[in-house]
């Protein structure tokens, strides 16, 4: 499985680089300051560029995929979410897609049986794992906010409280850490086990999974096992945020591995499929209302097309039309 | 058995020997290493040179997909790349759908062609990858840098062959897009793929022949005005023989309230003609002031399967004719892709239709405000409204010889969202109606396997495989509820499902919704009815003389 192996090696190499560079070559400033700044610049710049680039291409036609009853006669119940007829409903459609992966929730699994016979069963594992992965990721990112601000805001504390409610280890055990590891494992394994998934998967599908897995594993290591100096990390981050880069002493090299992998993810993000994060909001089959018979939608580049007019048609068929007693414009 | 159909026993064996969805062993193989193979039954005849000349399309020549050399024009790579660039700039859908796919695989087993052929390139995600791989090679910078890593490949004649094969094994039905978490619609990809192929003369005569006909004569079948009139008049004679009622359709009549447009298949092809008879009876029953045009005599739009410009060109006739005749609004017959175009494209392409009025049913005074801009009403909406207001005298017992199920056509389902109206009508015109399993109807409906201009005889092998999921769902209700009638609201369905049913489910007959309406309508002054519009005996209406015997 070269397709999966290659990205795995790439991630391992990427993890080794900062370790060696910081531990043995003293390149802390490069990995602690310069690369993070560069990464955040590429991430923001690239993300904005990609979204603007998409937005530059117009939406010539109103093409929502209608997954429910359209608005029609008064006595027929419209499915407002699946066949929205105004902006508000379409926005609700997109947001439920973003927050709950509604389309994926519909997922079925087809099976072929003797007969031949096809059967379709509900299949929600991908939905569950996808949702678990994305939500844990969000919670984890938000939790990290504490490293960037002197006074930890209330919402982060609440999040930490909820996430760590099991309270079985010291420091508190976070549920999301386990969930994200489990979800990523599932997402990798399903690509390897299913013949269809093996065929459609590319190295670029494995790479971000392994990368995020590595980031999470290193993070968990730092928190529970090979502890790093958290206060120094926080100093570094606050310095970076205030554009007063200064490298505190004594942060373990493992931290630089974690940070560097995050930087790689940030740099990789805008140029990869990870941009689905921005794309989902722009998808014309989901974010448009299904009202194109009711309201005119304008295509900015509507082409001029020479059509065959009725006059040309009558010119060709006038005699035959007259014989058939069809009315004609010119006798 | 049609000439290009696989033997049923062999196809069944194929399903039984390889019970998995993916047919074949693909361990350690990549999809891009699998060569395309054209054989009998899996390719459509290419467009005749004179057809291409007539509509001004590229590269007229004699060739066949089975040829080694497809005689692509000089500089075809440049044409494709520039064509791609221009479409990326014009269609956000195209760009976004190439960029955002994460290959999660949710779409993989949703395609009827994949379920019917087991061919990995029929997984919608791979169908899009056929273009995506070339796009990565040439377009986004990151793709260029990370070629091997990101699955990029060069544009070669082999790629063009692959595009031709698999963009004709997609009927633009949008089922995959229902399940995609990003709403990626393979129909958009296929449409762009076909546009690009047409730029270099890689095409399908079954699509371009009708396009050329429709442009010249007004309809796909190339029927000239006098023959068009004759045919509808002969249907009117059949109606009179059967019911004793003289329906009197008018043609190209100025000042009518409504212009009625339906696919020409309803005028000429069996069993579409019975649906046409249903329309004529309905209009007579309510006394609709309507006319039929010989110039805009096609509801369908095969231009939609070639290019956006050609779709516009053919569609323009509807408004052009409505304006000339001075009608108030347009009523459209039963058709799938016709309604995709009318619902999602027509006003944008050829509007505004400010010379028409917001449609109002003259009998119920219902305002069709959902059609306020296009001014075009679907016949199922129109009839449902009539029934709701008690304007029709119906005897559903007249359809008691039919045990029905309803096939949602893809475009009406996923490109318009009309689910309830046809069911409401069907419920009121017959007594036996059973739904197919829920994963095969409504927004999850399966295509007939022959939509988007591939309903040609020489393509039968692929059509019967692609239609298998639909046929299999019909088989389910046939076994469970003894269903013998498959009711549709699509002209392509009426043209293609009979062959599919004969192959997989002999004994199931295909009907149009308004054929059943026509059967059930109790006409004022009619003679005693014993036969339906097909002259099949109706159950419980046998001649009394027979009863006395």
Image (cartoon, helix red, strand yellow):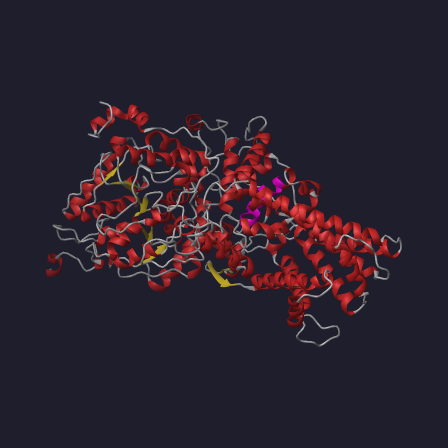
**Image height of A262 relative to B35, above or below:** below
Residue B507 visible to an observer of this rendering: no
**Is residue B382 visible in this depiction of the protein?**
yes
Q: Between B436 and B33, which is closer to the camera in this rendering?
A: B436
Q: Where is residue A99? Give x, y as percent.
A: 55, 60
Question: What secondary structure do most residues of the magenta stretch adopt?
Answer: helix
The quadrant of the rendering that contains the C terminus of chain B is bottom left
Chain part drawn in magenta: B119-135
| Residue appearing at x 82%, y 55% in the figure | A246
Between residue A289 and residue A67, name the one nearer to us.
Answer: A289
**Rendering coords of residue B307 (x, y %):** 46, 36
Horizontal and vertical percent position of residue B464:
44, 48
Residue B113 relative to residue B246: left or right: right
Residue B179 is a magenta residue: no
Position of residue B300 in the picture relative to residue B78 (left or right): left
- The answer to which image quadrant residue B355 occupies is top left
Magenta highlight on residue B127: yes
Q: Is residue B218 above or below residue A200?
A: above
Residue at image point 57% right, 47% down: B126
Total number of numbered discs in the rendering: 0
Q: Position of residue B269 (x, y in %)?
A: 31, 41
């Amino acid at each position: 499985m070269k397709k999966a192996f290659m990205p795995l090696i790439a991630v391992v190499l990427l993890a080794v680089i900062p370790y060696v560079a910081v531990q043995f070559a003293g390149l802390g400033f490069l990995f602690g300051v310069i690369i993070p700044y560069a990464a955040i610049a590429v991430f923001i710049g690239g993300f904005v560029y990609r979204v603007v680039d998409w937005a530059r291409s117009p939406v010539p036609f109103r093409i929502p995929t209608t997954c429910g009853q359209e608005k029609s006669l008064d006595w027929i119940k419209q499915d407002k979410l699946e066949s929205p007829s105004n902006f508000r409903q379409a926005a609700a459609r997109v947001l439920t897609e973003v927050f709950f992966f509604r389309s994926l929730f519909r997922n079925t699994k087809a099976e072929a049986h003797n007969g031949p016979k096809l059967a379709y069963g509900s299949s929600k594992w991908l939905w569950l794992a996808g949702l678990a992965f994305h939500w844990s990721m969000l919670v984890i990112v938000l939790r990290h906010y504490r490293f960037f601000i002197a006074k930890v805001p209330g919402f982060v504390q609440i999040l930490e409280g909820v996430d760590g409610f099991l309270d079985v280890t010291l420091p508190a055990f976070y549920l999301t850490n386990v969930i994200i590891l489990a979800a990523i494992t599932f997402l990798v394994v399903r690509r390897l086990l299913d013949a269809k998934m093996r065929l459609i998967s590319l190295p670029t599908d494995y790479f971000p999974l392994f990368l995020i897995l590595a980031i999470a594993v290193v993070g968990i290591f730092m928190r529970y096992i090979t502890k790093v100096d958290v206060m120094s990390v926080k100093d570094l981050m606050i310095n970076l945020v205030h554009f007063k880069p200064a490298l505190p002493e004594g942060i373990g090299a493992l931290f630089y591995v974690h940070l560097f992998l995050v930087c790689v993810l940030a740099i990789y993000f805008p140029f990869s499929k990870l941009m689905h994060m921005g794309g989902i909001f722009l998808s014309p089959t989901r974010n448009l209302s299904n009202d194109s018979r009711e309201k005119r939608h304008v295509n900015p580049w509507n082409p001029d097309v020479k059509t065959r007019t009725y006059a040309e048609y009558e010119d060709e068929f006038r005699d035959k039309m007259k014989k058939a007693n069809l009315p004609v414009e010119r006798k | 058995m049609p000439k290009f159909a696989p033997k049923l026993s062999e196809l069944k064996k194929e399903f039984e020997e390889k019970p998995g969805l993916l047919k074949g062993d693909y361990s350690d193989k990549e999809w891009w290493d699998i060569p395309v193979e054209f054989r009998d039954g899996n390719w459509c005849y290419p467009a005749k040179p004179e057809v291409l000349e007539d509509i001004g399309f590229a590269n007229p020549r004699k060739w066949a997909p089975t040829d080694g050399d497809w005689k692509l024009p000089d500089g075809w790579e440049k044409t494709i790349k520039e064509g791609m660039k221009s479409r990326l700039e014009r269609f956000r859908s195209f760009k976004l759908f190439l960029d955002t796919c994460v290959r999660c695989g949710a779409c993989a087993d949703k395609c009827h062609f994949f379920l019917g052929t087991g061919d990995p390139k029929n997984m919608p995600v791979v169908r899009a990858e056929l273009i995506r791989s070339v796009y990565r090679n040439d377009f986004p910078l990151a793709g260029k840098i990370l070629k091997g890593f990101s699955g990029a490949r060069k544009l070669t004649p082999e790629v063009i062959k692959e595009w031709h094969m698999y963009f004709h094994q997609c009927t633009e039905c949008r089922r995959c897009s229902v399940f995609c978490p990003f709403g990626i619609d393979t129909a958009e990809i296929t449409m762009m793929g076909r546009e690009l192929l047409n730029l270099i003369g890689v095409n399908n005569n079954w699509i371009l022949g009708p396009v050329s006909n429709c442009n010249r004569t007004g309809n796909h079948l190339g029927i000239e005005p006098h023959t068009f009139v004759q045919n509808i008049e002969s249907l009117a004679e059949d109606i009179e023989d059967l019911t004793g009622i003289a329906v009197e359709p008018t043609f190209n009549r100025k000042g009518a309230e409504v212009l009625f447009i339906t696919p020409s298949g309803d005028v000429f092809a069996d069993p579409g003609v019975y649906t046409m008879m249903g329309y004529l009876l309905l209009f007579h029953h309510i006394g609709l002031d309507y006319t039929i045009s010989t110039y805009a005599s096609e509801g369908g739009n095969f231009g939609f399967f070639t290019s956006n410009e050609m779709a516009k060109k053919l569609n323009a006739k509807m408004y052009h004719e409505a304006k000339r005749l001075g009608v108030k609004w347009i009523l459209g017959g039963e058709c799938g892709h016709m309604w995709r175009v009318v619902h999602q494209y027509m006003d944008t392409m050829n509007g505004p239709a400010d010379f028409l009025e917001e449609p109002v049913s003259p009998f119920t005074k219902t305002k069709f405000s959902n059609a306020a801009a296009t001014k075009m009403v679907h016949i199922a909406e129109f009839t449902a409204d009539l029934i709701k207001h008690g304007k029709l005298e119906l005897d559903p017992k007249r359809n008691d010889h039919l045990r029905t199920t309803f096939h949602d056509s893809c475009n009406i389902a996923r490109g318009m969202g009309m689910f309830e109206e046809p069911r409401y009508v069907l419920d009121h015109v017959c007594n036996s109606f059973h739904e197919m399993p829920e994963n095969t109807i409504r927004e999850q409906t399966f295509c007939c396997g022959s939509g988007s201009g591939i309903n040609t005889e020489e393509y039968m092998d692929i059509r019967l495989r692609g239609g298998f999921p639909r046929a299999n769902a019909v088989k389910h209700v046939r076994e469970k509820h003894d269903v013998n009638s498959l009711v549709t609201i699509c002209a392509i369905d009426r043209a293609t499902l009979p062959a599919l049913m004969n192959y997989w489910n002999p004994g199931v007959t295909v009907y149009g919704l308004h054929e059943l309406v026509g059967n059930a309508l109790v006409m004022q002054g009619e003679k005693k009815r014993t036969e339906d519009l097909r002259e099949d005996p109706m159950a419980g209406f046998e001649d009394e003389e027979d009863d006395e015997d």
